[in-house]
């Protein structure tokens, strides 16, 4: 149940992005659900590998390079999912930060500290 609620929260966060940034477009709730699912899969499967491969750069940048990795993965998902558009890499950079903040805020409001709705 918690997994489905988290997926829905992430889709809602994606639907909110075009209202905050004109360089991001999400055409429908179905597109947002698919993009949220794909973002979750990419962050679960590909992100750890990229973080490990770029560990020296991440250490030198004091962890800030992880923001670049997040932006790249956000942009990558936008390239794959039809109906989910991001104008460019720097738009993806800002959108990934906003997406994280919105999804964190929504999950904080909708889930208690034990993860129950």
Image: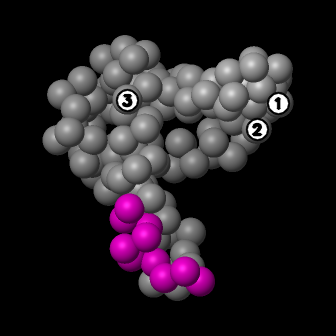
Q: Does the magenta stretch include residue 110?
A: yes
Quadrant for residue 60, please give it: top right
In the drawing, does residue 62 fall left or right of residue 4?
right
Q: Are marks 2 and 1 in contact (CB under 8 Å)?
A: yes
Residue 66 visible (yes or no): yes
On screen, 35 above or below 66? below
Sooner in the amino-acid sequence: mark 2 or mark 3:
2
Where's residue 65, x and y in %? 63, 24
User: Which region is colored magenta?
Assistant: 105-114
Q: Which of 65 and 1 is in front in this view?
A: 65
Sooner in the amino-acid sequence: mark 3 or mark 1:
1
* Mark 2 to mark 3 CA distance (whole Å): 21 Å
Where's residue 101, x and y in %? 40, 50
* Residue occupied by mark 1: 52
Callout 2 crowding tier (Cα within 10 Å): few <14, some 14–19, many ≥20: few
Where's residue 21, x and y in %? 22, 32
On screen, 112 above or below 53? below
Q: Which residue is drawn at 43% across and 16% down?
A: 89
Q: Residue at x 43, y 26 (%)?
A: 93
* Residue occupied by mark 3: 94
Quadrant for residue 66, please give it: top right
Given this view, does label 2 or label 3 mark the residue nearer the observer? 3
Q: Is residue 28 magenta?
A: no
* Mark 3 to mark 1 CA distance (whole Å): 23 Å
Q: Which colour style is shown?
A: one colour
Callout 3 crowding tier (Cα within 10 Å): few <14, some 14–19, many ≥20: some
* Residue occupied by mark 2: 48
């Amino acid at each position: 149940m918690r997994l489905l609620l988290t997926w829905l929260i992430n889709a809602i966060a994606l639907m909110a992005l075009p209202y905050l940034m004109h360089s991001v477009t999400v055409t429908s709730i179905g597109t947002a659900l698919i993009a949220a699912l794909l973002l979750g899969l990419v962050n679960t499967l590909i992100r750890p590998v990229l973080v490990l491969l770029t560990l020296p750069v991440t250490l030198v940048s004091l962890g800030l390079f992880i923001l670049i990795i997040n932006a790249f993965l956000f942009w990558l998902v936008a390239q794959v999912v039809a109906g989910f558009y991001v104008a460019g890499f720097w738009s993806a950079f800002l959108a990934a930060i906003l997406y994280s903040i919105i999804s964190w805020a929504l999950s904080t409001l909708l889930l208690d500290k034990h993860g129950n709705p």
